Image (cartoon, rainbow, N blue to C red):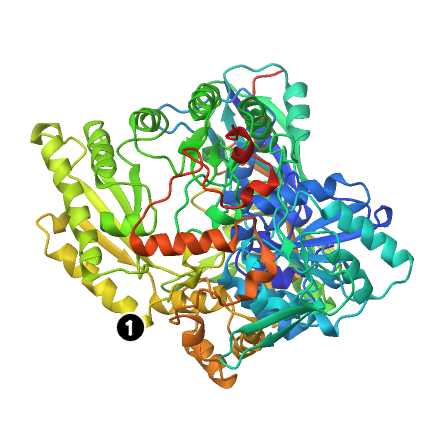
Amino acid sequence: MKVRIKFSKHGPTKYIGHLDMMRYFQKCMRRAEIDIKYSGGYSPHQIMSFAHPLGVGMETDGDYFDIEMNSFSDKEDIMSRLNAVMATGVRILDISLLDDKAPNAMASVAAALYKVTFENGDSFLPDILARVEQFFGQDEILYTKETKKNTLEVDLKPHIYNYSFSDKEFECLVDASSAGNIKSTQILEALYAYCNVAFDKNDFLVNRVETFADAGNDELHNFVPLSNWGKIND
Amino acid sequence: MLALDNKILMAIDKPARYIGNEINSVYKDKNKVDIRFAFAFPDVYEIGMSHLGLQILYDMLNKYDDVWCERVFSPWTDLDEIMRKNKIPLFALESQEPVKNMDFLGITIQYEMCYTNILQILDLSNIPLHSCDRTWDDPIVVGGGPCTYNPEPIADFFDFFYIGEGETKYRAILDLYKECKSKNMSRRDFLIEVSKLGGMYVPSLYDVTYNDDGTIKAYTPNAEGVPYVVKKEIVTDMTNATYPTSPVVPFIKVTQDRVVLEIQRGCIRGCRFCQAGQLYRPVRERDVEWLKTQAIAMLKATGHEEISLSSLSSSDYSQLEELVNFLIDECNKRYVNISLPSLRIDNFSVDVMGKVQDVKKSSLTFAPEAGSQRLRNVINKGLTEEDILSGARLAFKNGWTRVKLYFMLGLPGETEEDIRGIGELSDKIAKEFFDSVPKEERKNGPVQIVTSTSFFVPKPFTAFQWAPQNTKQEFIDKAYITRSSILERINQKRIKYNWHEADVSVLEGILARGDRKLNVAIETAYKLGCMYDAWSDSYKDELWQEAFKQNNIDISFYTTRERDLDEIFPWDILSCGVSKEWLKSEWLKSKEGIVTHNCAATCNGCGAGIYNAGICVTHRK
């Protein structure tokens, strides 16, 4: 049985990297005695796959992973057993039983909603706020991506689906698909460059509020949270 | 609140080393405890968190309602630099509060090469490096672990050393601390009272005088009621001793990322080079039924996917077969791997290893330690060439192809012939493979042997504590002879040879048998920039040499000098039960190549019987 698990991660646990979070959840499955399925072979491992790796330093209220289970008792029972063994800062928010034919979490990821605030509670500079509309109104939003080998100029604009700005908060719904994934801090960095203000991404706290699949198409998106995607109605 | 801000945590490697919060870590209300205890391992988090002793004592101290024990590790070099620059004091992982706020700073000292990291921890904590400069504004700094069996090179940096196993006396120490604080006693008076508890060595309460040749003349207590000899503490009943059911589970991958089940403490074998074999005498087993229950409980509480048995020599545990068969059954059900280190290769272990490991990927391990039977008798390593070859044959026939061999170079009385024996034995094992496995059955490929040598470092409380150590040049020459002895063999292409760095072994030798005169040199080395000496990338031999030079330390006094039979050693102020007279007889027997039987075969009267524990009781007729 395919089961999708939604979790949040806050506070100090944001410094735990993606691979370590995978190991963490594997141990959680054992502590909570979840009836998870194991692969065959000489060294069996739990069948578990994550939707979208979360970078070190980021928080989330909407991350997902899929597991396969041998038996599924009931949602509340599994949730409470898992939450009983969570580290402070990590919570299981939702569990959904998926249709056997549902695409896996990683392949389903189309978009993500991010909320960006200042680590120290600061507000955006008036200079920045004054130019937000102008910035997003450009035909192209160019961002210079530094890779190991070279620098690459990309246009962020087609990957930004929605955004909102307030004194203390920047929210954006952006492309998170494997082909077009962009980061919320890339947008901010481009904005700061546009305004000629020095940028340090470590000034900001990024929270992934939700991860979405696309029930629509490229012309007309219809983003639905991953927990509702491929779910068997309960 | 974390002690480090986001910018720092995002700038350093593996920030999760510094955040605490792991599963089974203990959080208490600091206003509801009387004693704050910082337990430090002076190396990086991944090493320290793999240490069983830390898990045992952390669990034990936190079971006391009036105590909050937290963990402290050496910040890695990247963070170390930032903390110095920004004047950020070293903090404990749980509360993230400065170490200086604690009542106690306990430092476990597992190897000599961490001494400069001890100074790093004190320094970053803003605790005066020297015990004599501390006041009640500083924590009481206590050292424990195997290196405290010769604590003299680091005596100035500690208020006292706990000699022996930590399970027995902490409650008494903590009660005494509360009492002394309530009576407004001086720090020195508190330490005098500590010394009377037994097992506690307070260096400042002893004056040392020296002979003209630099050797020790006498240790004299400088306060009333202080013991003349400090006797180690041990747990006499292992089964009822405290043991963590819920050890802390790190978020990041650490060296020992598994449940560790300590099946026994101590060792019946009397290998003459081995310090642990003497320090932990007598061997004490844990009850097999208790171990079974404990294993299941720990797997449940941690979620680990592997369990490992811990002991100095697992094959000597009397109920091993029953325990291992139980674990195989239970672990298969739970998809848990079993790791079985230090097993002698025989029918039972080959059968068991075939069940718990992938034969193609795992390797056989032998530790002959010396290349010839003559030298193996000198070091009392009860392993014969026939044992090794028949074990290898058995394993080869069951599909194994990888063999690891461990030897030491520089053992007392070693000749070139003994060294060449290493190549010879490696070659014989390869030959055994080709003789015992016909060509058509070599489905896992040909035999692959990895022969490794380390350099022998004489240690306190061993028969070889009198022995001269080799010079760096002798070590290098011997590694060269070993290599050529392998290269001239028929099967040399099947044998890979690894050897250790020689200069680190020389330093380890200086520190292992050093005296109080070395404190100043260690401090100089630290101030010159030495730290993480156990890590070859950060080890700076030229700075250590400079530190010895600046302080007029003659290295050969500590290393290559053969000690007189009646010399007073810096560690004679301590007792591990095994008597100096008995060690002396072992040293003399080694020179004749006479072997001594193990404790299970016969009692040799080593002196550990005074503890009335373990095998000393069960084998007493």
Q: Quadrant of residue B302?
A: top right
**Residue A23 rendering spot, x and y as whole percentages:** 51, 38
Q: Is A94 positioned to the left or the right of A97 in the image?
A: right
At x 13%, y 50%, the residue is B493
Which residue bears the numbered disc 1?
A: B473
- Judge whether B306 appears above or below B454 on screen: above
Report if residue A52 is visible in the image: yes
Whole-percent x, y for residue B606 in the image: 49, 46
Q: Callout 1: helix, strand or loop?
A: helix
Residue A5 figure quarter: top right
Which residue appears at 66% of the width and 19% of the height? A77
Q: Is residue A177 above or below residue B393?
A: below
B4 displayed left or right of B426: right
Give the chain letter at badge 1.
B
Q: Nearer the viewer, residue B326 or A98?
A: B326
Residue drawn at x 29%, y 25% is B347
Q: Which quadrant is the C terminus of chain A positioned in?
A: top right
| Residue type at tag 1 | Gln
Residue B113 drawn at (x, y percent):
49, 63
Q: Residue furthest right?
A: B183
Q: Residue at x 30, y 29 (%)?
A: B346
- Residue nearest the viewer, comparing B180 with B62: B180
How many discs mark residues in the rendered view? Answer: 1
